[in-house]
Image: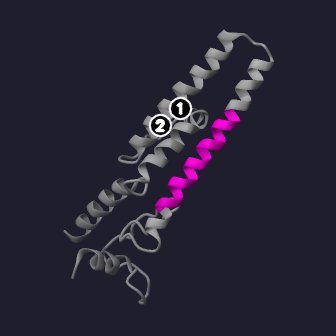
Amino acid sequence: MDEVSEVKRRVGGGGGGSGGAVEGVPRPEPIRFFGTTWVAHDGGYAWRRAGLAVGSLVAIAAGAAVLRFGFQGLADADVGPFVTFLAVAGFAVCSALAFQRTWRGFSRRREAGAEQGLLAIGFLGVLLAYFLRAFTEAPGEALHRAEHATASGRRRS
């Protein structure tokens, strides 16, 4: 039996049957936008990855336009170049940190006290990380696959 068929058999996705996991083998954890299609790369997995890449790119463009209007508002208010510099630098730093934390979160679990405010301000970095990761895998797939393999191996022993 090939690897994909074995994985489908384990998670109950091989067409028909009870749809439940094989006794003793844990169910894979679903990933946002992908469900459990990441396990065997079925159920429109490639289309979902393409849609995630396009959707995040569109969201980046929309977010950049909104930020541009915000910075234009600063210029219209004539707050001065120092305040404008601080605003641009703040968004740039938050975006870079958000990108780094999001990218790292695809391969290991986030710590409990993740800074949600930083991720919200640096939303362009988060969206860029999702856009780039969608070219290689579903975001977080490697982490979920490793955890599932570890749990499956632990259950069989």
Query: Quick check: 32 left or right of 21?
Result: right
Q: Are marks 1 and 2 in contact (CB under 8 Å)?
A: yes
In the rendered image, residue 24, in percent from the top left (x then y), is placed at: 30, 75
Q: Residues within 10 Å of mark 1 (few under 14, many from 20)?
A: many
Span of residues in magenta: 49-67
Q: Residues within 10 Å of mark 2 (few under 14, many from 20)?
A: many
Residue projecting furthest to the right:
77
Is residue 61 in the magenta section? yes
Q: Residue at x 27, y 78 (%)?
A: 6
Quarter containing the C terminus: bottom left
Which quadrant holds residue 83? top right
Identify the secondary structure beneath mark 1.
Answer: helix
How many numbered marks does the figure carry? 2
- Magenta region, mostly helix, strand or loop? helix
* In the foreground, 18 or 95: 95
* In the foreground, 50 or 11: 50
Residue at the spot of label 2: 99
Q: Residue at x 67, y 16 (%)?
A: 84
Quarter containing the N terminus: bottom left
In the rendered image, residue 72, in percent from the top left (x then y), is placed at: 74, 25
Query: Quick check: 41 left or right of 83?
Result: left
Q: Which mark is residue 146?
A: none
Instruction: Kindly identify the amino acid type of the residue bearing the numbered disc 1.
Output: Ser
Query: Quick check: 121 left or right of 104?
Result: right
Identify the secondary structure beneath mark 2.
Answer: helix
Q: Residue at x 24, y 64 (%)?
A: 154
Residue at the spot of label 1: 95
In the rendered image, residue 99, in percent from the top left (x then y), is placed at: 47, 37
| Mark 1 → mark 2, Cα distance in angstroms | 6 Å
